[in-house]
Image (cartoon, rainbow, N blue to C red):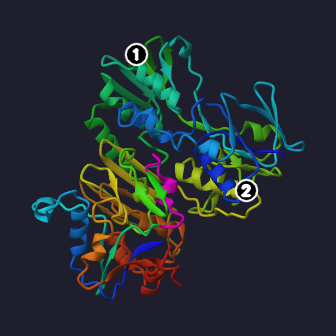
Amino acid sequence: MKRVYVNEEWCLGCHLCEYNCAFANSGEADMAVALKGKPLYPRIHIEEGDKICYAVSCRHCTDPLCVKSCIAAALQINDGVITVDQSRCVGCLTCVLVCPFGALAPNENGVMQKCELCLQNTCGAPACVQGCPNRAIVYEERSAAE
Amino acid sequence: MKPYVILGNGVAAAHCIEGIRSVDKETPITVVSAETHPVYCRPLISYYLEGRTEPARMNYRPEDFYAKNNCTVLYGRTATAMDAAQKTVALDDGGVLPYTALCVATGSSPFVPPTEGLDSVEQKFTFLTLDDAIALKQAATGKSRVLIVGAGLIGLKCAEGLRPLVKEITVCDLADRVLSSILDNDCAARMQARLEQNGVRFLLSDTAVRYEKNTALMKSGKQVDFDLLVLAVGVRANTTLIKNCGGKTERGILVDDRMQTSLPDVYAAGDCTQGMDASIGQQRVLAILPNASLQGHCAGINMAGGDAVFSNAIPMNAIGFFGLHALSAGSDCGGEVYEETDERHLKRLFSKDNRLTGYMLIGDVARAGIYTSLIREQTPLDTLDFERLKQSPTTTAFPQRERRHKFGGAV
C-alpha cells in the first residue's frame, strides 16, 4: 500500500505541508479563505530537533494500536487506510494515549482528525506531498525498514 | 464439529472472534451473551447519558458481524457451570455446549456493598451496561437530586454524563480523593476542581452507612437527600466459573501471555482476567479497553491453533471531565520523578533503572503516545535523548537509526 514517507535529510522545516494539509481538508476552494487569520489544525506536523526536522503524519500501521484502543469504534481500517468516523468520536483521547508516533490530534472542536492520505477530500492524493518544495515528502509503496 | 465457545459478548469477545477467524475460517463460533445487545462500546454509556451518542451509533461492529463470521449468539443466556474434562459449558436454560476451545470474556460485575436500608431505596442503579444507562436516563429529570456512591472512573463519568440532565449531583467516597486508584493527590485535586466548577458536589472520606428511602445517612453524620441513587463503589471480575472448575483465580482469572488459563483449552480475555502488568512485572487486573481488545485477539488466534503472544500490557488511561484531560500510563515504581507543573498543566515522568516506567499528564497531553510506547517497549533511556523527551514527547529524541526504522518503511 502507498503511504506518505519523509526523507529527513531533505526536509527544510518550512511547514508548508501543514498549510497544504489544513487547506486540503478545509473544504474551501481558496487558501486565504480557508486559513487566513485562523488557528491551524493540520493532520501532519513538523518535528524539530537538534539540526533535524521532518514531517510526521499517520503511518497507517498494519496492526494499529489506535484502532484497537478506540472506545467508540470511530477509528477504522478501510483497505489499509486508517480513517476516523467523526460522527462516532467522543474526543476521549485514548488514541493520543496510544499512538507511538504522536500522529493524531483533535480538531478545533475536540473531535479527532488524522491523515487519511487525502483520499476522502477533493485533493485525491496527499496534498503535503504535492506541495513539498524539496520533495522531502513522498507517497509510495515501501516494505518494512530495517 | 464442536464450535469455539466465547462466554461474554463485549469488546474482548469481538476481538476474539476476529482472532479466531484470522486462523480458522470454518469452525462455527457460539457466543453466550448475558446482555441482549450486539457488542457495543461500553465506555460510551456516559456519553449516551449526556446525548453525545445514541444506541444506534454505539455498535462496536457492523450489523452483519456475527453472520459474516459464522457466529451464533445466544442472547440473554449465561453460563452456570463448566466441565473442563468433558469440555462442556452448562447454560442457565439447561442447555449444554460442547467446545473445541473456550474463551471466558465475562467481564466484571458491580460490587454493591450491603448497606442497611438499601432495600427501601426505590430508584437505585448501577452503571456498567447500556441497559443501566438507558434506565438511568429514563429516570433522570431536571428536578432529580442524584447521589453517586463511589468517586472512581465509573462514578465520575456517570456524574459528568448526568450533569446536564439533573438538578444536583453529590458524589461520596470513602477515599480522601477522587479516582484514588488512578491518580495521586495533586492530580486528583485538579480533576475534582474541574468537576466542582461544573456543579458536582463531593463528600470525600465519607460514605452512606444507612438509607431511609430517599435519604442517605453518612458516616460523618451528614444527611443527603436524593431522588436517584447510583452505586458505583467498584467492580469485581467475574471469575466464578473458572474458580468452581478448579482453575486458578485471584482478583481475576489468571492468564499467561497467550491468554491461556490454568485449564486446558480454556482461555480468558478482558476485564475478568489478571495478567502480567509489564510496567511493574507483577500480575494484576487491568480492566481497560485496549487490554480487552489485545487480549481477545491473542486468545482467539491461540484457540484456533495459531501462536500469538501479548506480553506488554500496561495500565493506561485517558480520563477527561468537562474538557480537562488527564492521560497516564505505566506505574510509579519508586524511581526518579521529573515534574513540571503550573496552574493549567501537570507533567510527571517516572523512571527507574534506565527505563520510563510511567507518566501522568494533565492539560497539555499532545503526543503522549510517544511516552506510552517507551514504557510498552521498555526502551533503554540511554539510547535516546531523554532530556529532550522530558520537555515534550518527540520522536526527534530517538537516534537516527531508530527514526529510520520508525518512519522509513511500512510499520
Q: Is residue B315 visible?
A: yes
Residue B310 relative to residue B159: left or right: right
Is A8 rendered above or below residue A75?
below
Chain for disc number 1: B
Taking depth in this image into account, of B341 and B167 the one nearest to the observer is B167
Marks 2 and 1, how far apart in space?
Answer: 52 Å
- For image coordinates 38% across by 47% down, the residue present is A89
- Residue A37 drawn in magenta: no
Discs 2 and 1 lie in a common subunit? yes
Chain for disc number 2: B
Q: Which one is earlier in the sequence, the residue at label 2 or at label 1?
A: 2
**Amino acid at dot 2:** Asp
- Residue A73 drawn in magenta: yes
Estimate the x, y position of residue A57 in percent, counting from the top left: 36, 69
Instruction: Please tell me whether mark 1 sits on a helix, a strand or a loop.
Output: loop
Is B231 rendered above or below residue B234?
above
Taking depth in this image into account, of B316 and B95 the one nearest to the observer is B95
- For image coordinates 57% across by 36% down, the residue present is B38
Taking depth in this image into account, of B311 and A108 the one nearest to the observer is A108
Q: Nearer the viewer, mark 2 or mark 1?
A: 2
Estimate the x, y position of residue B237 in percent, counting from the top left: 64, 40
Q: Which residues are magenta?
A: A61-74
Write down the residue under mark 2: B24
Is B71 rendered above or below residue A32?
above
Write down the residue under mark 1: B227
Instruction: Please tell me whether mark 2 sits on a helix, a strand or a loop.
Output: loop
Estimate the x, y position of residue B148 in percent, counting from the top left: 43, 27
